[in-house]
Amino acid sequence: MKEEFKLVQFERKKGSKYNLDFLSLEHAKKVQNFHASFPVYEFTPLAEMKNTAKDMGLGNVYIKDESYRFGLNAFKVLGGSYSIGNYLANKLGENISDLPYEKLISDEIRERLGEITFITATDGNHGRGVAWTAKQLRQKSVVYMPKGSSKERLKNIQAEGAEASITDLNYDEAVRLAFSEAQKKGWVMVQDTAWEGYEDIPTWIIQGYGTMGYEAYTQLNEKPTHIFLQAGVGSFAGAITGFFSSIYGEERPIITIVEPNKADCVFRTADANDGKLHFVTGDMDTLMAGLACGEPCSIGWEILRDYADNFISCPDYAAAQGMRILGNPSHGDSKVISGESGASAFGCVAEIMRNPELKEIKEKLKLDEDSKVLFFSTEGDTDGESYKSIVWDGKYQRK
C-alpha cells in the first residue's frame, strides 16, 4: 500500500443533526463525578507547548496527557468503568449517580449482583481498563486480543486478573468472537463498537470518554481554534467531537479526524458519504495498533458525520514522528510520553505544518501562526520496546 496523506472535507451541516444531549456539559459533569469517586482519580495534565507550536508554525498547542490515567497509562478505563458502572446500576435498579466507587465495591452490592464475567476484544488499552474495573468489583473478565498484539500489553491485562489471550484473528474478527462467547455463556460484552441491538454499552463507553473532554475544557485558558482526534472505530473521536460541539454549537473549533492509511474505515465512510458504513478488511498491520479497526462504530459515525469538518488518512511514519517530537519538544516545553496511537494526530499535524509538499492540505485545514490546537495523547508507552525502537532507534522514518 502506498503511504500518503489523504483529506476529505465536509461542509457544516444545516438543519437537523444528531442529538448531542447525552454528551452535554451537564451530563459530562455527571460522568466526571462518577470517575472522581474512584480513589485513584485525578485530572490528567494538559501540557501547553508554546515553543513547539511556534517552531511548527502554529499559535499554541495543548496536549491532554492520558498516560497518567488511573495508573494504567491510557484513557480507555474511563469508558470501561463508566459502562460497567451503568450496566450494574441497571441490573440493581438504581441510578449510577447513587453508586459511587465505595458502594460498588461493597459486600452488599457484590452479594446482590452475584458473579458476573465481562468479556471484550482489544489491542490492549481497553482490555486493561475492563480487566482493572472487573478486578476492583471482584468480578471476572475475559479478553481476546487480535493477532500481532504486544506481549507486554497482554501481560499487563493478565496482571489485572483477566483470562487474556492473543488470537489469530484481526480486531473485528476478535470482536465477533467475544460477542459469540458472551451470548453462548451469558457473559457481558463490553465493547465500544456498536451495531443494531448492541448500543447501550457503547453509548455508555462514549459518555465515559467525555470525562477527558470535560477536564480539558476546564483546564484550557483559551478556546481552541482546532481539535485533532485520532480514530479507531470512532467512539473516542465521537465523544470529544460531540462534547465540544454540544458546548460551542456552530462556533465550535474546526474538528479533524485522523486515521492510519492501513485502517481508515472512518475516512473511507466519509469519502464515500453514501449513507453506509465502509469497512477495511485484512490484517491492518499499522504501527498505530490501537487504531487498527476496520469497522466504524455506528454511534460514533453519526456524531462525526454531522459535526466533524475534516477526515485524514495518514502514513505510519507520521505517528512515529509525533512520538519523537512530543518526547523531545522545543526548549522550555515539558515532554509528553506518547504511544503510537496517542501521538498519531499530533504527528499528522507536525508533518503537515513542516512538509512543503503538504502546503495545500495545511491551507485547507486553515492552520497557521494564529491556530490554537488541542490534541489528546490517549496513551503513554504501553508497549515499551516499541516505544524505544521508534524514539531511541528511529524506526518508521519518512519515506
Image (tube, rainbow, N blue to C red):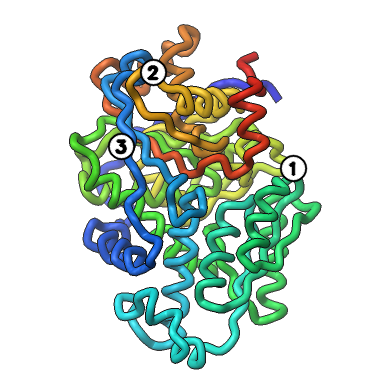
Counting from the top left corner in percent of width and height, residue 59 is at 26, 20
Pointer 1 and pointer 2: residues touching (CB < 8 Å)? Answer: no
Q: Quadrant of the N terminus?
A: top right
Q: Which mark is residue 282?
A: 1
User: Could you tell which of marks 1 and 2 lies nearer the N-terminus?
Assistant: 1
Pointer 1 and pointer 3: residues touching (CB < 8 Å)? Answer: no
Instruction: Residue at 55% x, 37% y: name it.
Output: 339
Q: Amino acid at mark 1?
A: Gly
Question: Pointer 2: residues within 10 angstroms few (<14), some, or many (20+)?
Answer: some
Q: Quadrant of residue 28?
A: bottom left
User: Could you tell which of marks 1 and 3 lies nearer the N-terminus?
Assistant: 3
Image side of residue 202 versus residue 228, left or right: right
CA distance for labels 1 and 2: 39 Å
- Residue 242 visible? The answer is no
Q: Which mark is residue 12?
A: 3
Counting from the top left corner in percent of width and height, residue 382 is at 58, 44
Q: Amino acid at mark 3?
A: Arg
Instruction: Residue at 74% x, 41% y: name it.
Output: 283
Q: Which mark is residue 330?
A: 2
* Residue that lies at the very extreme toward the right in this rendered image: 168
Question: Pointer 1: residues within 10 angstroms few (<14), some, or many (20+)?
Answer: few
Q: Quadrant of residue 391?
A: top right
Q: Secondary structure at mark 1?
A: loop
